[in-house]
Image (cartoon, rainbow, N blue to C red):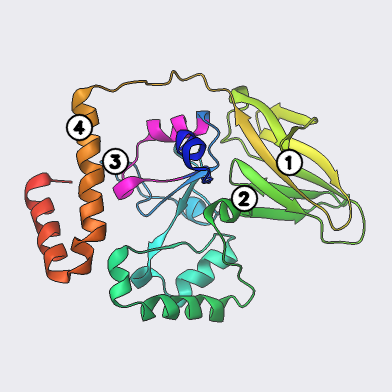
């Protein structure tokens, strides 16, 4: 994506959406080492390793059990009911919906889900993934006036909307490996005051009235970059990309063809 940005000038948020919903714990660790902010997926567990999430994991903005890298869960429109939206909002989880090209055969369903979300949360903000994960935080105010912020992403934006200076303690929790942290950036500039112990990472800062700052973790990349995975892997990756384009640009426009293609995939490709 960095090369794509260099070639086209188009920026890309450092949030991974896994192709076909397949991921591994190793992939999560690699994303973390490259300082990605988070991952988003429909399936809440690694490919071929079904697990049951605990109530505690569901009652927080992101799942952190896979290498300590945040995984945000999204759902199709058909599985996003009013009580699901209310549950997410109560526990500080973003409402993420997913659909494919065929949804435009009935575009009114997009209007319906937007209206449903707006009716449950009239103050909801619609934005891109980087902004969504960066604002997925839990906060509490301590007796001494310090605002403790629990971050669930590699980047977090803190806003002081009060009329006075506020002190914040930004915490990444014990799921984050402090030994892998190289530095914390505040609006792109190295920040001081980082504390690392068995409880996790903490950064204490003061924000002026009406100001906002973005804080980002920078990890040490100790994993060797794989230059070439071999001819077989490259051919398979090429075919998958082209087949995905055929599905999105052609098959998705014909319900019968799409249904037949999915049946063929389940019957012969086993993926």
Q: Earlier in the sequence, mark 4 or mark 1?
A: 1
Q: Which residue is mark 3?
A: 49
Residue 68 visible in the displayed image:
no
x, y percentage for residue 218? 62, 30
Q: Quadrant of residue 196?
A: top right
Asked which secondary structure carries label 3, the reply is: loop
Q: Which residue is mark 2?
A: 134
- Measured Cα–Cα span from mark 4 to mark 2: 36 Å
Q: Earlier in the sequence, mark 4 or mark 2?
A: 2
Determine if the magenta segment contains residue 31.
yes
Q: Disc 3 vs disc 2: which is toward the camera?
A: 2
| Magenta residue span | 16-32
Q: Residues within 10 Å of mark 2 (few under 14, many from 20)?
A: many
Residues at badges 4 and 2 in contact (C-beta under 8 Å)? no
Q: Which residue is mark 1?
A: 187
Q: Disc 4 vs disc 2: which is toward the camera?
A: 4
- Measured Cα–Cα span from mark 1 to mark 2: 13 Å
The single residue placed furthest to the right in the displayed view is 164
The relative height of residue 266 versus residue 127 in the rendered view (above or below) is: above
Q: Residue at x 63, y 39 (%)?
A: 173
Q: Which residue is mark 4?
A: 235
Asked which secondary structure carries label 1, the reply is: loop
Determine if the magenta segment contains residue 187.
no
Numbered label tally: 4
């Amino acid at each position: 994506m960095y090369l794509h940005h260099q070639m086209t000038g188009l920026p890309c948020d450092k949030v991974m959406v896994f192709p076909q919903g397949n991921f591994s714990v190793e992939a999560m660790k690699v994303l973390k080492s490259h300082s990605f902010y988070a991952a988003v997926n429909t399936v809440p567990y690694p490919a071929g390793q079904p697990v049951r999430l605990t109530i505690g994991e569901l009652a927080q903005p992101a799942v952190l059990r896979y290498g300590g890298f945040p995984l945000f869960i999204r759902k199709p429109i058909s599985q996003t009911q009013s009580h699901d939206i209310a549950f997410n909002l109560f526990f500080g989880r973003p409402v993420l919906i997913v659909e494919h090209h065929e949804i435009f055969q009935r575009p009114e369903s997009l209007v319906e889900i937007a209206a449903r979300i707006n009716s449950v949360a009239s103050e909801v903000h619609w934005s891109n993934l980087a902004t969504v994960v960066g604002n997925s935080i839990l906060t509490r105010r301590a007796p001494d006036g310090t605002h403790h912020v629990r971050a669930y992403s590699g980047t977090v934006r803190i806003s002081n909307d009060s009329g006075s200076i506020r002190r914040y303690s930004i915490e990444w929790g014990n799921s984050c490996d402090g030994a892998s942290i190289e530095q914390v950036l505040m609006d792109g500039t190295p920040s001081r005051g980082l504390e690392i112990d068995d409880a996790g990472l903490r950064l204490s800062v003061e924000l002026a009235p009406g100001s906002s700052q973005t804080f980002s973790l920078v990890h040490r990349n100790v994993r060797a970059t794989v230059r070439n995975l071999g001819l077989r892997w490259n051919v398979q990756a090429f075919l998958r990309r082209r087949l995905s384009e055929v599905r999105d640009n052609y098959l998705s426009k014909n319900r019968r063809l799409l249904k037949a293609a999915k049946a063929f995939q389940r019957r012969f490709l086993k993926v």
